[in-house]
Image: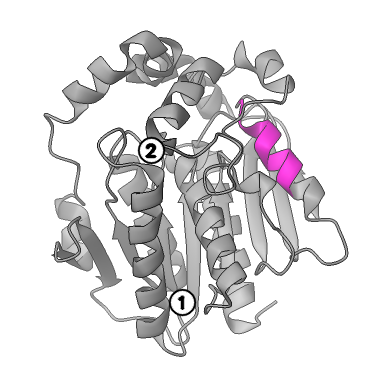
Amino acid sequence: MTIRSFMASLRARLVNLALPLLGVKRFFSEPDRLEERIAALRKKTPVRPGRALQKEFAIEEDGRRGFPVVTMAPRNGLADGAPHLLYFHGGGYVMPISAFHWNAIAQLCRDLGASATVPLYPLAPETKAIETLDLMRGLTEDVITASGSRPVIMLGDSAGGGMALALTQMLLQDGAPMPASLVLFSPWLDATASDPRQKDIEGRDRMLAVAGLGACADLFRGDLARDDPRISPLLGPLDGLPPVAIFSGTSDILLVDGQRLGAKLTSPDAAEHVYFEYDGMFHDWMLLPVPEGKAALDQAAEFIRRHSTGEP
């Protein structure tokens, strides 16, 4: 099923104009300076939930796996039948989590009365795909086991969306316990950048650039080819997946990845899915304080609720 949203709000259009001030477009547009900029990022401590979220949620951090794993749960208790969220943040596999991620995760927990696990997974180029995915695979299996009868929902944005899909494919192939559903925000699903339509969109994408994503993929993949399903899960097996929700914006070069996944999931043996396409919206808009961001999170919560409790 495809659901389209039209007419970007005035606030979203203003935010889109201001996006270059965040420096993300510059980061991805100059691949020859990528490693220099990553080195500068490593001098900063990754963002943790702020004071307001610490008052609202019981937040714990565990570093025993060799990387931080943050868990958060509403201080006023979980809702009856609430799922547990496992969220993989975006950032091209090279950038750390941001305050925007924490705010979006918190909003989903509020809407669902849910708890969440958020791994601050090892980043490239220091750690390569095979090792990172192996670590995330172990965490995923442990979270699903520990949740017992509570459904686990895997979510991710951008590169984190690709990671969530790749991990689910790995679980599927090995016959391991699966998440109840997948939610993919502006997912990066094909590291080959082989679809020429991305270049057509690049001029209106004020955050990402094709060359920069390719450079990030090369830093992350290690000995894997760009078309290996572990970093390009769009090219991997899709039959037998749990229900999938995909969110894409038309001013995002990764629109193409979301569209292609939605098209592939229309086969009779593929997962039940819903594809949301927002006209004029930029990469990861659902993380930002715009009306369309709240709408997307509301739709994600509705999808999660439906596939967790059977509610309409």
Look at the image and tell me whether residue 91 can be seen.
no
Q: Outermost residue, front direction?
A: 223
Q: Label 1 amino acid?
A: Pro
Dot 2: what SS?
loop
List the residue tagged with mark 1. 83
List the residue tagged with mark 2. 93
- Rendered image quadrant of residue 191: top right
Range shown magenta: 253-261
- Rendered image quadrant of residue 46: top left
Separation of residues labelled 1 and 2 (CA atoms): 26 Å
Residue drawn at the location 54% of the way across and 54% of the way down: 166
- Rendered image quadrant of residue 29: top left
Q: State the image coordinates of residue 178 (x, y, percent, origin top left).
A: 55, 75
Q: Label 2 amino acid?
A: Tyr
Residue drawn at the location 56% of the way across and 28% of the way down: 282
> Majority secondary structure of the magenta segment?
helix
Q: Position of 274 compared to 13: left or right?
A: right
Q: Position of 20 compared to 251: left or right?
A: left
16 in relation to 243, above or below: above
Of the residues under marks 1 and 2, which one precedes in the sequence? 1
126 in relation to 239, above or below: above
Badge 1 density bin: few <14, some 14–19, many ≥20, Cα 10 Å:
many
Q: Which mark is residue 283?
A: none
Q: Outermost residue, right direction?
A: 268
Q: Quadrant of the N terminus?
A: bottom right
Task: Give the label, 1 or 2, closer to the camera.
Answer: 2
Q: State the image coordinates of residue 127 (x, y, percent, origin top left).
A: 28, 42
Q: State the image coordinates of residue 132 (x, y, percent, origin top left).
A: 35, 51
Q: State the image coordinates of residue 312 (x, y, percent, origin top left).
A: 70, 76
**In the rendered structure, does residue 83 fall within the stretch colored magenta?**
no
